[in-house]
Image: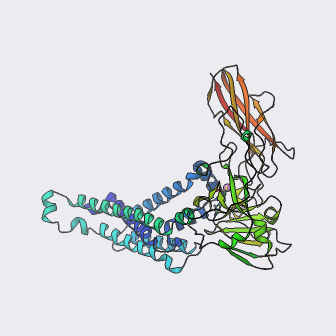
Amino acid sequence: MAQTTTGLRMGAGVAAAAVALGVVQLTAAFFSPAADARTAVGTAVINATPGPVKEWAIQTFGTADKLFLSVAVIAVVAVLAATAAIWERSRIPVGTIAFLLAAIAGSVAVLARPGARPVDIIPTLLGAVCGIVVLRLLTSGRIAEGRATPATDAAGVDPGRRLSLATLGFVALGVLGGVAGTVISRRLHSVSGDRDSFALPSAAPPSPVPSNVTPAGVQLPSFITPNGDFYRIDTALSVPQLSRADFRLRIHGMVDRELTYTFDDLKKFEPIEKVVTLTCVSNPVGGDLISNATWTGYRVRDLLRDAGIHSDADMVLSTSVDGFTAGTPVEALTDGRDAMLAIGMNGVPLPVEHGYPARLVVPGLYGYVSATKWVVDLELTRFDKVQAYWSKLGWSERGPIKTESRIDVPRDGQKVGKGPAAFGGVAWAQNRGVKAVEVRIDDGPWQPAQLGAAYSNDTWRLWSFPWTATQTGTHSITVRATDNTGAVQTEDQAPPAPDGATGWHSVSFEVV
Ligand SMILES: Nc1nc2c(c(=O)[nH]1)N[C@H]1C(S)=C(S)[C@@H](COP(=O)(O)O)O[C@H]1N2
Ligand SMILES: [Mo]
């Protein structure tokens, strides 16, 4: 009979899963953000993914890694549901059991979210129940064998076809529910209105960016990265929506006095503005996980002053509203580098995906040990007592940014005409500053590149290299930087894990 064919059963499983996910998504919109089981499960998957696989995902998909994960999770769910549905029988309801197990796993994942309450599992349970109902309906044979109305018979719709249509209908319902849920939850929880109504405090502007930070004659990344082009890396499957009214920053642990700041409380501190280049430890040699912005905010040092830090505390464990943690040396947060609680980026409130309403920005340290977005908690503690998110996964506890440089022009394989050419790129060594950049063509001697003006030790430096192409064929260009301590960028190749990639960036191009 039609309803027993494997294909129809697999379809039934997929339809049931679609309905279950759609119902979860739709109902979760009316609960706290923790109730979003898709995000909860995805986050659990991210947390359980071995470090090297995460690394691969970040490097392969970059900012699109989350999209990849969502698609992968949906694909896995569909395959599992289809498989389980094949074995759904009235005596041994394998499919039903699979849905129940999924509901339990989903509930556990939901309850593991920061701020989750027991009621937040209701959408997950409801979704599972609806999924089971659909699964049983489609696999029971009731639709295929049910009494056909004269109209359908007249139209010549055979039972198998009727079942297929029902299956498609349920898939469509599930998708609709999912889309509606996403839209409604955006409406209900979005902080974009809160952000739009926020006027940044006016801070003493940083020293102006002179036009000669950019060498002439070559197309380089702009010295200040526009917000829309700024790289983005985080473990947040759905961007946390934390309003200024709900924001609290708690300071506790090895302190004399615990403090909690509301967003309004921050007004009592002196606002500052600072240009700082952020870099991700996952950036491979030649990669683009580095950007530069003008940040507005407050000195972390000022925020910590009244707490009375114990002298044996050596780490600040910062936590975001979605549970990410970073461990930063107390010294880096309190010394003269002016580590910031940033609330503005390039003259506007922080974009939500970059940490609205507040995040940390610490010059000289990779983001994973310092740049906590949506930050809500600073705990004074010790490196020998706790490990932060990435350190638990084997990444180095300390993450000073390494001296590195990148070639932006030419691109790999680019064709270059005979005659004069202009190459260029960026170099960085935050907190130390870039002193020199050298370039080598093929196996030739190292030659000094022309440098854009140094803005500060905490920002990258743009460089260019005029060259005259005389010989056609394949050539290579290699770059290396020297920082203000005199240290020359090492040639030794190291992967990003555990503490940042090293090696010289080299690009080959064709002279034609
Ligand atoms: N809440 C939260 N903050 C986070 C992360 C995260 O996963 N969650 N990732 C960190 C990492 S690894 C980097 S490199 C920087 C990137 O900041 P950006 O996305 O604003 O460029 O954010 C840091 N702050
Ligand atoms: Mo990162």
Q: Is residue 351 above or below residue 135?
A: above
Number of callouts:
0
Question: Is residue 495 or residue 438 the one in the foreground?
Answer: 438
Residue 457's place in the image compared with 48, above or below, is above
| Residue 460 visible in the snapshot | yes
Relative to 194, 274 lies left or right: right
Which residue appears at 50% of the width and 56% of the height? Answer: 72
Q: Residue at x 34, y 72 (%)?
A: 133
Q: Is 348 situated left or right of 125 in this image?
A: right
Give how far across and how far down residue 367 sits, in percent.
Answer: 70, 57
Q: Position of residue 21 (x, y in %)?
A: 42, 66
Give 139 or 463, whichever is nearer the viewer: 463
Q: Residue at x 44, y 75 (%)?
A: 125
Please identify the quadrant where the N terminus is shown.
bottom left
Q: Splitting the image into four quadrants, where does ligand 2 fall?
A: bottom right
Q: Closer to the camera, 84 or 411?
A: 411
> Is residue 239 shown to the viewer in this render?
no
In the displayed structure, does residue 41 sit left or right of residue 55? left
Which one is nearer the viewer's eye here, 426 or 19? 426
In percent of width and height, residue 247 lies at 62, 72
The image quadrant of residue 361 is bottom right
Residue 447 percent across, percent down from the top left:
80, 30
Query: Which quadrant would the C terminus be assigned to in this image?
Result: top right
